[in-house]
Amino acid sequence: MQKEITCTECANRCRLLVEQQGDEILVQGNRCPRGLKSGREEFLGERVTVHGFVRSSVEGVEKIPVQTSKPVAKGMVYKVTLAIKRVKVTVPVTAGTILVENISSTGADLIVSEQE
Ligand code: SF4
């Protein structure tokens, strides 16, 4: 099984091709060791990007799609989800705007996603 993953550890956003061969997880496309680790963890489901919606009081906008800027440990998903529920946007925002820095101390920021 192969999976394409975008490494979000830095602004280069390398496209990783990750596949399992027997007991080994092979990663291609990473420009540094951080991508190797990130690709393996995301492939194995140990880290995930959390998606959700935050409330908005901006006229005509009921809710805004958000996500973590990079995958977080699976064990932190519930905590991040609760933190997302507490966020309310009061001014117009665009994709990529950081709403919460280092959300739930995960090292990831909560950012506005591309509108669907
Ligand atoms: S593999 Fe390395 S260089 Fe590429 S996005 Fe990830 S951290 Fe950045």
Image (cartoon, helix red, strand yellow):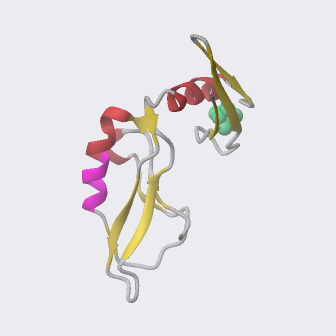
Membership of 81 in magenta stretch: yes
Q: Count the numbered circles shown.
A: 0
Compared with residue 44, is residue 64 higher up or lower down, i.e. above or below? below
Camera-nearest residue between 106 and 36: 36
Left or right placement of residue 113 versus residue 104 in this view: right
Left or right placement of residue 28 versus residue 71 in this view: right
Camera-nearest residue between 24 and 97: 24
Ligand number 1: quarter of image: top right
Determine the residue positioned at 45% across, 33% down: 47
Compared with residue 76, is residue 51 higher up or lower down, i.e. above or below? below
Membership of 30 in magenta stretch: no
Image quarter of residue 108:
top left
Determine the residue positioned at 45% across, 39% down: 48
Compared with residue 19, is residue 76 higher up or lower down, i.e. above or below? below
State which quarter of the image contains the N terminus.
top right
Image quarter of residue 73:
top left
Camera-nearest residue between 89 and 72: 72
Determine the residue positioned at 54% across, 30% down: 43
Dominant SS in magenta: helix
Magenta residues, start to end:
80-86
Residue 2 is situated, as x and y percent measured from the top left of the image, at 65, 31
Left or right placement of residue 9 versus residue 81 in this view: right
Residue 78 is situated, as x and y percent measured from the top left of the image, at 27, 44
Residue 93 is situated, as x and y percent measured from the top left of the image, at 48, 73
Q: Residue furthest bottom?
A: 59
Determine the residue positioned at 51% across, 43% down: 70
Image quarter of residue 26:
top right
